[in-house]
Amino acid sequence: MADRSSMPQVVIVSPYLRAANNGNWRTAERWRRYLAGVCDARIVDAWPDAQAAGDQAMIALHARRSAAAISAWHAAHPGRGLAVVLTGTDLYRDIHTDAQARRSLDLAQALVTLQEQAPRALPAEVRGKARVIYQSVSARPALAKTTRHLRALAVGHLREEKSPDTLFAAACLLSRRSPGRPKNDLAPSGAGSDVFSEPGAQLTGRQDIRIDHIGAVLDPALAKAARATMRAVPHYRWLGGLPHEATRRRIQRAHLLVHPSRMEGGAHVIIEAVVSGTPVLASRIDGNVGMLGEDYAGYFEWGDAQSLAALLLRCRADAAFLDRLRRQCQARAPLFEPATEAAALGRLVEDLLEKAP
């Protein structure tokens, strides 16, 4: 192993540290590990710190939340060694409304996005700085899945950006399926309401599609809605926040991951599903299309609970369609291999160090 004292020093700025155990922290920590043979990297939530004098490059997660550190780096090292990693809230909200987030784009020498559609959201004058680095996770085999019902799993904290209300509404629609309607007589995604009985109809007791939902409470109103959905719909369960390992095991066992988000920079849970052989039903937003590809068959329009419910019905009834989704996800899996991410990250740091102080 190389002597760390002889390596260039790189600082990774993350607005969240180990205690948060969220996506930002896990990305920062994974990148620190991947860079172990390239540089001496450390993670901070504020810069400058006690070791700042030795830093030769900075990678900052979040244009807005890390704006103070980005500005301080520019003041100390103007025009040198700065990459800004853009999240979904950066790309699809903050850089269009927040002056500090927009300034972060101007100060950076490199802008890192996490999926292939993201550079289109950048202002034209900074788009040339952008590069895509897909996140990665170790592959896992699919686990045995029950044939008694279709198990759909949603993973996302209860907050507005994740659109859990679309999941609640789809679960309620499925509970009102007309009992005389055969399972294989399905309307396509986006079809009319004839797949379902009227809103006032009684529950049919058919629970051949079950929905589990993992996510901690970030919005109390959405937690209240989740509890109300559980009371009304026997086949929906909100499990709260679970440890990462337990979540991954559930992804491996699920027939489908459901991801209805309104805004995404590049959802890590989609990667975890793809590399576990679990196909995805996702809202048709840039952050999801940039992960799964423009021709993926498992999209529904954002906020369209009826289309999501129809897709779930189709997956339950049509094994060939479910297998098609699985094969499409399998074709994307090489993008999310750890070696691919590590190589792209190494190239980024080499480029930054060329501009180092």
Image (tube, rainbow, N blue to C red):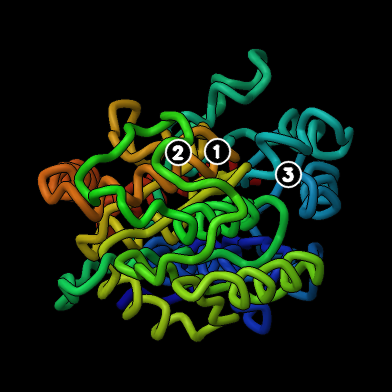
| Label 3: which secondary element | loop
**Residue at (22, 67) in percent of width and height:** 139
- Which residue is labeled 2 in the image? 307
Q: Amino acid at mark 3?
A: Ala
Indicate which disc residue 288 carries.
none
Residue toward you, 326 or 31:
326
Q: Residues within 10 Å of mark 1 (few under 14, many from 20)?
A: some
Q: Is residue 113 visible?
A: yes
Residue toward you, 312 or 181:
181
Relative placement, left or right, of 206 versus 61 is left
Q: Amino acid at mark 2?
A: Ser
Q: Position of residue 39 (x, y in %)?
A: 46, 63
- Which residue is labeled 1 in the image? 304
- Which residue is labeled 3 in the image? 63
Whether pointer 2 and pointer 3 mark residues with C-beta atoms closer than 8 Å, the reply is no
Whether pointer 3 and pointer 1 mark residues with C-beta atoms closer than 8 Å, the reply is no
For marks 2 and 3, the one nearer the N-term is: 3
| Label 2: which secondary element | helix
Q: Is residue 65 above or below residue 356?
A: below
Quadrant of the drawing holding the N terminus: bottom left
**Residue at (52, 49) in percent of width and height:** 260
Q: Position of residue 157 (x, y in %)?
A: 63, 67
Residue at far top of view: 124
Q: Position of residue 256 (x, y in %)?
A: 31, 59
Whether pointer 2 and pointer 1 mark residues with C-beta atoms closer than 8 Å, the reply is yes
For marks 3 and 1, the one nearer the N-term is: 3
